[in-house]
Image (cartoon, rainbow, N blue to C red):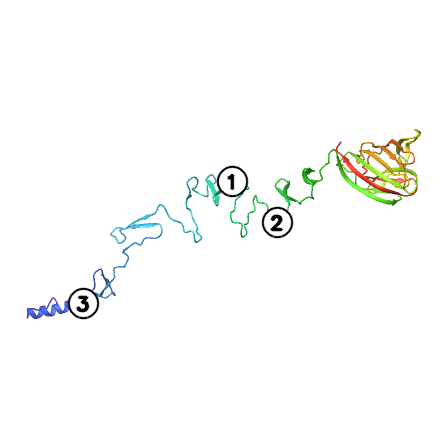
Amino acid sequence: MPTATDLVTDLPADFEVFGQAVDTDFVDLLGGTTGQILSKTSATDLDFTWIANDQGDITGVTAGNGITVTSPTGPVPTVAINTAVTADLTTAQTLTNKKLSDSTTTIVDVSDPTKAIKFDVAGTTAITGTIATAFTTAKTVTIPDTTGTVALTNGVVNNTLTTTTGDIIYASAANTPARLGIGSASQVLSVSGGIPAWSTPSTGAMTLISTTSFSAQSSQSFNSVFSATYNNYKVMITTFGSADTQMNFRFRASGTDNSSANYNYAVIGTGAISGSTSTDGNAGSATSMQIGSNNNTVQRQLISMDIISPFSTTSTKGLSYSFIRSRTAIFGGNGYGLLDVSGTAFDGFTLIPASGTLSGTVSIYGMSI
């Protein structure tokens, strides 16, 4: 390459030398293809190379899900977000700072407790209201698919509370579900102590409490037959004994007879054929009340007795009775008795023959009056 001080002695030759030098120094400028750009290969002067045009300028924009691109390769691409996006229902989705809406209800900002919310399961709206209240009060959600396990703890009764076919769920207290087991055949649902209970229905004005048959007993007791359920009772007695003697009656409580000398009674009997009468009584010093006789096996006796307020702790206990017995001459009578003992609730009674043994059947009814 000629320098600035070289003399031109042979112009054609000097130009040839100059051209060869230019060709050598700028050789890196040769070549390349359409669209490539010139790039420095190193810090050396005139050290270039041709490369693809990907060194920072946008060469194209590819649209993704929910995005539309106009003029993707330029010179000025336009990018727009679709207003309607089809959700991917096959995989779990996380929505952050998003707006959910339907035709009637919108959650604009879930951090704002005043915004409206709607929770819908299988087309049945179950939870509505504001965010501040929708998930803090008891709600009922209808789940159409009963397979598997659904953990719902607010406002739902656990199905393990019922153990037997026919069980009933009721509230034993506010917000406290409880189980009432199925009752017996012919029982009816009633209320006892403010909660549901099974009970035996009354038959008219009287309800049969018990029927007991016995044989050759020196005395016969009946326990737990009086209660607060009824004020008064009807007792039907059919007896016969090993000896012809009188029948006595005592109240009892918690399995123990009241044998104190505080019974009052009066009885009168009349012969059906002779018309003769007999009387007996005691004014508060007897240890039992006479209610008729305990005839021998040939002479049976029927007693119909009303017992008044035996379970009351404040009222005087009383009874009224009539009896008839079969003898060679039929004999019958009536009587009454009183026991003025306060503070004791008597739940039973005892039949006692004056001698020998007694056999028979006793039926006890609670009276609704």
Q: Which residue is mark 2?
A: 160
Give coordinates of residue 233: x percent, y percent. 79, 35
Disc 1, SS: helix
Disc 2, SS: helix
Instruction: Please tell me in which quadrant of the rendered image residue 334 appears.
Output: top right
Disc 3, SS: helix
**Closer to the camera, 315 or 97?**
315
Give coordinates of residue 58: x percent, y percent. 28, 55
Q: Can residue 288 be seen in the rendering of this structure?
A: no
Camera-near label (1 vs 2) is: 2
- Amino acid type of the residue tagged 3 in the rendering: Val
Relative to 302, 44 lies left or right: left
Q: What is the distance, in whole Å, between disc 3 and disc 1 at their CAs?
A: 80 Å
Relative to 271, 93 lies left or right: left
Give coordinates of residue 263: x percent, y percent. 88, 34
User: What residue is shown at x 51% (from left), y 40% (from top)?
Assistant: 133
Q: Which residue is mark 3?
A: 27
User: What residue is shown at x 80% (from left), y 39% (from top)?
Assistant: 363
Q: Which residue is mark 1?
A: 133
Camera-near label (3 vs 1) is: 1
Q: Which mark is residue 62?
A: none
Instruction: Please tell me in which quadrant of the rendered image residue 73 appears.
Output: bottom left
- Amino acid type of the residue tagged 1 in the rendering: Thr
